[in-house]
Image: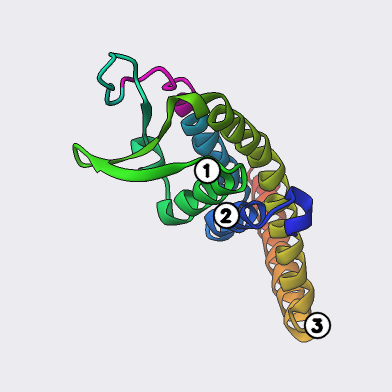
Amino acid sequence: MASDFGDESGEKLFDWMLRMGQDAGQDAIKASAERLRDAIRNIRGQMNEEGPEREGGAKEFARLNMSEFEELPDYATLKEIIDERLNDAAIEHDFVKVDGHEHLVFRVAAAPEVDEVFANLEKDVDRAAEQAIEQHEHDLTEQRDAEPLEQKAQAAKAASAAAHESKEATRQMERVEVKTR
């Protein structure tokens, strides 16, 4: 799976998507992917946020507020993914707590590379969501196929009996209506 994305963080992204969808299915996968994509877009828009200034007045470090990511399920895994992607790109960075929220801190000179890392992550979100949906559907099919034939037959008999009873009740009502006319 990692070969699909070229790194281990891609596999973690896929696993994260799959975990989000295990309980609620495709809608949860799509909703989680959309929230993650929105958080990435918003953080990419923060690239101009002020950071600590050097003596000459120019900013040396940029700081991105990770609060939207913190609100997503399993933030620790998302943080690992981002950390690995930045490490793979050889971008010096750190996560620090400021005003109760984590921030990603990096050199201003690395801002274009950081933006590229997040742009690539945003592209991978869609691919990972599609794969997680396919895997979820495959898992459901396997569960259904793994159900013993006897249980399937009993369920079919029960459904048939219910349909027959429903049809018989309708006939009885039609007979009553005909007699009353």
| Image quadrant assignment for residue 2 | bottom right
Question: Which stretch did the figure color magenta?
Answer: 41-50
Please report whichever mark, 3 or 1, sits nearer to the chain's N-terminal start.
Answer: 1
Q: Would you name the residue on which mark 1 appears?
A: 32
Q: Would you name the residue on which mark 2 appears?
A: 21
Which numbered disc, 3 or 1, marks the residue closer to the eye? Answer: 1
Please report whichever mark, 2 or 1, sits nearer to the chain's N-terminal start.
Answer: 2
Magenta part mainly helix, strand or loop?
loop
Q: Residues within 10 Å of mark 3 (few under 14, many from 20)?
A: few
Tell which of 54 and 101 is nearer to you. 54
Q: Residues within 10 Å of mark 2 (few under 14, many from 20)?
A: many
Question: Residue 149: which disc?
Answer: 3
Q: Residues within 10 Å of mark 1 (few under 14, many from 20)?
A: many
How far is disc 3 from disc 1 in space, using C-alphas?
Answer: 36 Å
Q: Quadrant of the C terminus?
A: top right
**Do the residues under discs 2 and 1 have CB atoms within 8 angstroms?**
yes
Expressed as whole percent of the image width and height from the top left, the position of residue 156 reads 76, 72
Res. 175 visible in picture: no
Res. 118 visible in picture: yes
How far is disc 3 from disc 2 in space, using C-alphas?
Answer: 28 Å
Q: Is residue 57 above or below residue 65?
A: above
Asked if residue 87 lies in the magenta stretch, the reply is: no
